[in-house]
Image (cartoon, helix red, strand yellow):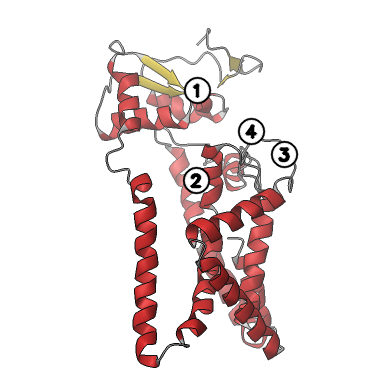
Amino acid sequence: SAPAVPLVLWMLFVARAQLLTLRTFPILILAGLLGLTPYAYLPFAGKNAGFGAWGEMDSMEGFLTHFLRKEYGTFRLYSGNDNKHGEQLSKALVLYVKNVSMESMLTIGAPVALLGVLRSLTESLSARSLDSAGFAIALAFTFYMVLFHYLSNLPLDQPLYFGVHMRFWMQAHIVAFAWLGLGAAPIWRLLPPRFASPTAALCTLALVAAQIGLHFKKMDQSSNDYVHNYGLMNLEKLPHNSMLIVKGDVITNSVRYLQRCEGVRLDVQHFDQSMMTYEWFVKKQARHFKNITFPNLVYNPYKEIGHSMELF
């Protein structure tokens, strides 16, 4: 991930005498490559792609398309937004600061985290050496925040996409809360030693309880069956042996779940219209449909290898 890049470079610089050797450095490269071994499974899985499997993993072009996320745009989160890189940078950074300070840290934690940042950087500067971990962590945080928000092109004014965007804040939050701990430590030391640890523990538990109290009602989805019912609504009234052609993640996944996990209306053949627009769909997915003939390779009436919905 992005935060690892400056950390890895920092570690290689700091421990260069031990790591950048003919014996150790190849081992580090091998360890990094081992982390990519799940990708080696994809070409084998792609030969007999299951129903609903995405892409053509058993071809070099299909594998690279998946690996580089070409269908969404390499180094982009969203294929439906033509904004240039960096257009939302300042707006996105402001939204992150508001979220981490006012919601995640309940406002009171923000100045403490800022104190932690100052403490970390001050200790790094006083050491007068790049060996300080505080310097490296600050660099990793800055690198990730700027790079991610520069590349992110999701429309932040739409709640659904903003929610997706917020998922990528978790990595930055790890560092932010580490700074919160660094800032809180000298505050607890102002108390008598026998009261410092119990007070810190009680305050931490109180903050966790406050978060639960403030957000439990909104986050409790234990009785939420809207998506389940939505899927049933689309399946239950269909005639026997129907074809159901849908578009969209919610309807596609709700129907797919009901059929494959609960065995609901297995007589209905379910087509994802979005998947039908890709040239690999007929090649990899046609075998899963009974008595269905695809008039051409792709659902796109404007391509020579395409067909219209009417012809289908």
Rendered image: mark on residue 230: none
Q: Are marks 4 and 1 in contact (CB under 8 Å)?
A: no
Q: Residue at x 62, y 87 (%)?
A: 18
Q: Residue at x 38, y 53 (%)?
A: 214
| Residue that mark 3 sits on | 83
Please indicate, yes or no, whether residue 207 appears anywhere in the rendered image. Answer: yes
Answer above or below: position of 46 versus 107: above
Q: Residue furthest left?
A: 263
| Residue that mark 2 sits on | 43
Q: CA distance from mark 3 to mark 2?
A: 33 Å
Quadrant of the drawing holding the N terminus: bottom right
Sequence order check: which comes first, mark 3 or mark 1?
3
| Residue that mark 1 sits on | 273
Q: Residues within 10 Å of mark 4 (few under 14, many from 20)?
A: few
Sequence order check: which comes first, mark 3 or mark 2?
2
Q: CA distance from mark 1 to mark 2?
A: 24 Å
Q: Residue furthest bottom?
A: 193
| Residue that mark 4 sits on | 80
Q: Nearer the viewer, residue 83 or 193?
A: 193
Tell me the kind of residue under disc 3: Asn
Q: Position of residue 133 (x, y in %)?
A: 60, 80
Tell me the kind of residue under disc 1: Gln
Residue depth check, mark 4 versus mark 1: number of the one nearer the observer: 4
Tell me the kind of residue under disc 2: Pro
Q: Tell me the SS state at disc 4.
A: loop
Tell me the kind of residue under disc 4: Gly
Answer above or below: position of 300 versus 94: above
Residue depth check, mark 1 versus mark 2: number of the one nearer the observer: 1
Q: Residue at x 37, y 60 (%)?
A: 210
Q: CA distance from mark 2 to mark 4?
A: 28 Å
Residue depth check, mark 2 versus mark 4: number of the one nearer the observer: 4
Answer above or below: position of 247 versus 106: above
